[in-house]
Image (spheres, grey):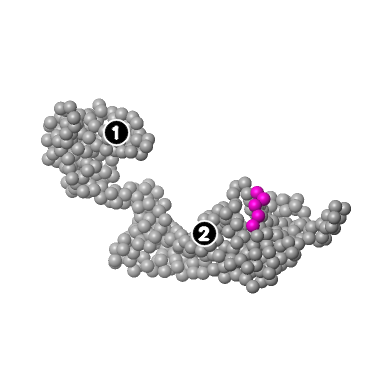
Amino acid sequence: MTDIVFTRRSGWIPNVIREHGELKLMLGAGADANHAPRTFTFPIAEAHLAVIREDLARHLLLWSAVLPLCDAAGTRGRLDEKAAVALLDPILLSAPADVDAFFQRIPWDRGRLIAHGAGIDLLESGQVCAAMRAATEASDGKRAQKYHADRRRAERGVVLGPLDAAILMYTGQYLHGATVPKRLPDAVDTTLLPEVMRVIATAEQACAGMRIGRDPRRGKRATDKRAWDRMATTVDAAVRRAYPELVDDAVRTVSFLMCSEAVDRSRSMPLGDDEEAAGDRADLGGSTRKRILTFTDDKGVEKKWLPDSPRTATGEFWEFVGDRSAADNEVFTIEDEERGEGIQLHFYADSIARVTTVREGGGGSGGSAPEYQVEYSLVDGIDGYRTLVSTFVRGGCAALGPHGSWMADAADLERARRRRDAE
């Protein structure tokens, strides 16, 4: 039978229980293999209970020293009770100076004490008892997170100034740099907010008119990495020019914010239409809208675009690519059967082939085979592909001439590709 002998208002601070007549400290820490919280107990004496009842600071210090033992137990191991019991007297019954000295020799959870109000400067100087004079039962997890974030920066040699810190607070990236940035003006001190907004305005002006589309070669939600890098570089340069005192962390969070918002704008539209929103509506009203186009992939899947389709041919084609593209499916074609021409996109090699019918095949079983002219060109990333596709849709193979260095020999293409990759 288990009875709770002593507990504090915060449910996570260890309780004292009596189990089969024996006093024990009980705490939850870590998780098992199924992610359920683990509970550990170990025996204590009446003298230890008396201190735990009366001295919150010593209670919290004991907790912080036991937690590393719980971590060592992992998902299924047993708590080292002998080691846990060995913590009791030095922490609960020793003089403050001896407690400070003891904490110099053992592992302990610094963040737990900071979350409960411990003085950070005193902790850092080894005065743990003095640091705990400000301790509270209530826990402030963000205070501990901020401390750990600052320590990680300090390990990289980064010291934030007031404006740096305010910018990171504004984007929500002060605690976790991997968090997708947001605009959180309420998180910034009102005296610093106007300066933060001037930094943001500088970034917005620098990337006005720039956009980051998607890269359907890598799926429907994949980002065009080259466009991201261009925007980030532009914003970084503008902000560093205007505010040279800002640390790299602050500058990067601003460019991350600008790029993330640009991606969100593209993703709010159907794949392909994000290009048209940027002004690329070249195929609207063009002659190709009067003819059927056929899209195919390397797996033999086919889709037809009809002139009365509510979407443009380029939009439907990139939607098709986004749906079908995969590591083993990187060749896509667009065929205009009426014109007798088409293009084949080789995403695995950043190249394209344009195919034009030179002579139609003769009818019947004894007729001559059709003759085709095939020319190849390298392609400069997804932007190059978008230009070539929209140009073909609008004007066919003939219109592609100015948009590539066309080669009649596949071997020449391979040599050109190797030269490009070696640069």
Q: Which residue is mark 2?
A: 228
Q: Is residue 140 visible?
A: yes
Left or right of 55 on screen, residue 348: right
Type of the residue with mark 2 = Trp
Label 2 neighbourhood size at 10 Å, few (<14), some (14-19), many (20+)?
Answer: many
Residue 21 badge: none
Depth check, front residue: 291 or 159:
291
Q: Residue 251 is drawn in which quadrant?
A: bottom left
Left or right of 396 on screen, residue 131: left
Q: Measuring 37% from the left and 52% from the top, which residue is drawn there?
A: 176
Left or right of 164 on screen, residue 224: right
Q: Which residue is mark 1?
A: 69
Image location of residue 247, percent across then percent down? 40, 58
Q: Give the mark, 1 or 2, whose residue is nearer the N terminus.
A: 1
| Residue 299 inside the magenta-drawn segment | yes
Q: Which residues are magenta?
A: 298-303
In terms of secondary structure, what is the magenta stretch mainly? loop
Image location of residue 342, percent across then percent down? 71, 60
Type of the residue with mark 1 = Leu
Depth check, front residue: 309 or 31:
309
Left or right of 218 on screen, residue 246: left
- Reply above or below: 2 against 329: above
Q: Measuring 68% from the left and 69% from the top, which residue is drawn there?
A: 290
User: What kind of element bears circle 1?
Assistant: helix
Depth check, front residue: 347 or 210:
347
Residue projecting furthest to the bottom: 285
